[in-house]
Image (cartoon, rainbow, N blue to C red):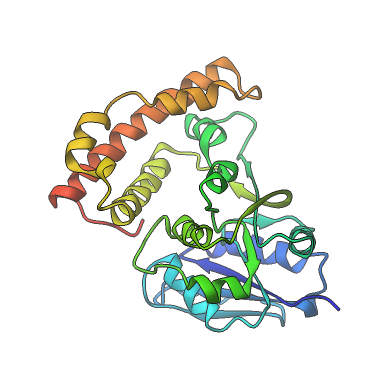
């Protein structure tokens, strides 16, 4: 008998890409009567009348801002013994559910799947080159016990044990939940065959928007840590990103020009993030939902 799975998909003003996600979930090789999809509209003032959902899909609304508040609202309704998370801009592979369950049945407690970027064209923009180098590095996240919810699957019992997401966060709540799970002995396993596709951000403006969101999450999560003190940000925040350089230099699939572009972008974005976080610390900036 197939295990029942609840798939949770938050969305925020992203109806066009959500339809692609719905199509991919509808095409899963896993039997449709063995999973449900709960989509959470996180903007009550934004509606989509032309969204045709299969019988095992439903759309709910959560007014509290933030994807973690949206996921928590769906968790309160989910009936599956397995919970799978992805995002409205992701396109799960046809075997996504089937392969994830095979991993769980083989003994995995949490599965962090592979996130494959795709691009608008073969000629990449500088922003896409940066994303190619650094975006969605699940392997790095799981080394610390985390995983991004663009592609994370686990047993429902672990969410009941660890608790739900910290819905005060606008960013970083997926890894924060993973660290709590890791701290009580619930390990995470990387699965290269559990795949979702994700569009690369293709403009510098989109990268800056993401940096503001991540910076706000970092200040919220690490508020008491010395490395995020105002003094440490001033001392270290504007130094060249040595770790980013070492990380990218090992990527054999990237050309030298691509590596140089990505490193330059990484430094620019580090300076921007540091300046933004200092602004948050002194009260000039505020944590945004971006």
180, 81: nearer the viewer: 180
Image quarter hosting the C terminus: bottom left
Q: In this rendering, is residue 173 above or below 235? A: below
Q: Quadrant of residue 231?
A: top left
96, 129: nearer the viewer: 96
Residue at position x 55%, y 53% in the image: 147
Residue at position x 48%, y 29% in the image: 126
Is residue 41 visible in the rendered image? The answer is no
Q: In the rendering, at what x and y percent does residue 285 appear?
A: 19, 51
Q: Is residue 65 left or right of residue 39?
A: left
Q: How many marks?
A: 0
Is residue 248 visible in the rendered image? The answer is yes
Q: In the rendering, at what x and y percent does residue 180 appear?
A: 47, 61
234, 259: nearer the viewer: 234
Q: In the rendering, at what x and y percent does residue 243 appear?
A: 44, 27
Q: Is residue 51 left or right of residue 47?
A: right
Residue at position x 34%, y 29% in the image: 268
Residue at position x 38%, y 27% in the image: 241
Residue sticking out furthest to the right: 1
Q: In this rendering, is residue 213 above or below 55? A: above
Q: Quadrant of residue 57?
A: bottom right
220, 203: nearer the viewer: 220
Q: In this rendering, is residue 199 above or below 27? A: above
Q: Is residue 233 left or right of residue 209?
A: left
Image quarter hosting the N terminus: bottom right
């Amino acid at each position: 008998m197939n295990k029942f799975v609840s798939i949770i998909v938050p969305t925020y003003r992203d109806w066009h890409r959500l339809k692609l996600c719905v199509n991919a979930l509808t095409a899963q090789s896993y039997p449709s009567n063995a999973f449900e999809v709960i989509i959470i509209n996180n903007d009550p003032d934004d509606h989509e009348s032309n969204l045709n959902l299969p019988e095992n899909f439903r759309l709910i609304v959560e007014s509290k801002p933030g994807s973690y508040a949206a996921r928590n609202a769906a968790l309160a309704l989910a009936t599956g013994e397995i919970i799978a998370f992805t995002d409205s801009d992701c396109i799960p592979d046809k075997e996504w559910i089937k392969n994830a369950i095979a991993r769980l049945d083989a003994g995995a407690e949490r599965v962090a799947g592979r996130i494959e970027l795709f691009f608008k064209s073969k000629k990449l923009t500088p922003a896409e080159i940066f994303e190619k180098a650094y975006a969605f590095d699940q392997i790095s996240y799981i080394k610390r016990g985390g995983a991004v919810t663009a592609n994370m699957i686990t047993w429902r019992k672990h969410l009941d044990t660890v608790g739900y997401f910290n819905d005060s966060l606008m960013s970083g709540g997926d890894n924060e939940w993973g660290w709590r799970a890791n701290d009580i002995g619930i390990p995470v396993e990387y699965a290269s065959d559990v795949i979702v596709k994700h569009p690369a951000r293709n403009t510098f403006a989109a990268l800056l928007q993401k940096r503001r969101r991540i910076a706000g999450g970092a200040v919220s999560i690490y508020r008491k840590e010395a490395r995020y003190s105002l003094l440490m940000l001033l001392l270290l925040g504007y130094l060249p990103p040595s770790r980013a350089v070492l990380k990218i230099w090992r990527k054999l699939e990237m050309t030298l020009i691509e590596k140089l572009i990505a490193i330059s972008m990484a430094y620019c974005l580090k300076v921007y993030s540091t300046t933004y976080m200092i602004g948050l610390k002194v009260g000039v900036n505020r944590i945004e939902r971006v």
